[in-house]
Image (cartoon, grey):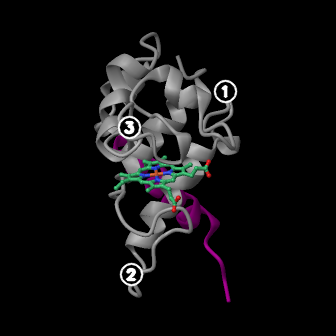
């Protein structure tokens, strides 16, 4: 079969370009390189809505408080949630990704950590959390 490298390259480029607007669409802070993503301005609302209602001062489930930057950085009794600069090593990302994956599971199975509760974040919100951690989680 004859291959068409130029057509394939054009398709690949088209796919790549088609993905670009998605990554920046809902993340105005990320689209401006000089404007760093911060907890106060960008990630607090996401973490508050997803986690802090069960992990806060009155209800620190599993010893974990996620209602302040200190709490998020400190983590639980067992382990840290965030490894500043390294989203791939950060437990927070693994947890939100597993919650999102379980939401798409037709069997309705939830994650090992949570039997019920956390609502899945959108892919854009997870990307924003990753970028925030990679920029140092300030
Ligand atoms: C509806 C309430 C609820 C929400 C929302 C929630 N959690 Fe939890 N979480 C719990 C409970 C309850 C436990 C303890 C589980 C147990 O002991 O059986 C727990 C345990 C944990 C643990 C285990 C502690 C450890 O170090 O092993 C981590 C980590 C955690 N939650 C992270 C999160 C994150 C991140 C979010 C937001 C994406 C979140 N939780 C949202 C209720 C919640």
Is 46 left or right of 128, judged from the image as shown? left
> Which mark is in front, 3 or 1?
3
Q: CA distance from mark 1 to mark 2?
A: 33 Å
Magenta stretch, main secondary structure, is helix
Sequence-wise, the earlier of marks 3 and 1 is 3
Q: Is residue 55 above or below residue 115?
A: above
Residue found at x 34% / y 52% = 122
Q: Is residue 42 above or below residue 119?
A: above
Q: Nearer the viewer, residue 138 or 23?
A: 138
Q: Is residue 43 above or below residue 32?
A: below
Q: Is residue 90 above or below residue 32?
A: below
Q: Secondary structure at mark 3?
A: helix
Q: Nearer the viewer, residue 32 or 75?
A: 75
Q: Secondary structure at mark 2?
A: loop
Mark 3 close to ligand 1, CB under 8 Å: yes
Q: Is residue 129 found inside the magenta-colored segment of the image? A: no
Spot occupied by residue 1 in the image (x, y as percentages of width and height): 68, 89
**Can you identify the residue that label 1 sits on?**
85
**Occupied quadrant, residue 92:** top right
Residue found at x 66% / y 83% = 2
Spot occupied by residue 101 in the image (x, y as percentages of width and height): 47, 68
Q: Nearer the viewer, residue 131 or 74?
A: 74
Sequence-wise, the earlier of marks 1 and 2 is 1
Label 2: few (<14), some (14–19) or many (≥20) C-alpha neighbours in 10 Å: few
Spot occupied by residue 68 in the image (x, y as percentages of width and height): 42, 23
Label 3: few (<14), some (14–19) or many (≥20) C-alpha neighbours in 10 Å: many
**Can you identify the residue that label 3 sits on?**
47
Is 86 left or right of 66, judged from the image as shown? right
**Can you identify the residue that label 2 sits on?**
108
Q: Is residue 8 found inside the magenta-colored segment of the image? A: yes
Which residues are drawn in magenta? 1-22
């Amino acid at each position: 079969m004859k291959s068409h490298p130029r057509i394939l390259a054009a398709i690949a480029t088209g796919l790549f370009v088609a993905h670009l607007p998605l990554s920046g669409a809902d993340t105005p802070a990320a689209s401006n390189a000089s404007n760093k993503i911060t907890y106060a301005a960008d990630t607090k609302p996401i973490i508050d809505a997803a986690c802090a209602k069960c992990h806060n001062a009155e209800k620190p489930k599993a010893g974990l408080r996620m209602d302040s930057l200190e709490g998020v950085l400190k983590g639980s009794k067992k382990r840290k949630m965030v490894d500043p600069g390294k989203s791939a090593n950060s437990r927070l990302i693994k947890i939100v990704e597993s919650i999102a994956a379980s939401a798409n599971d037709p069997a309705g199975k939830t994650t090992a950590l949570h039997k019920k509760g956390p609502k899945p974040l959108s892919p854009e919100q997870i990307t924003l959390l990753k970028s925030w951690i990679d920029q140092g989680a300030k």
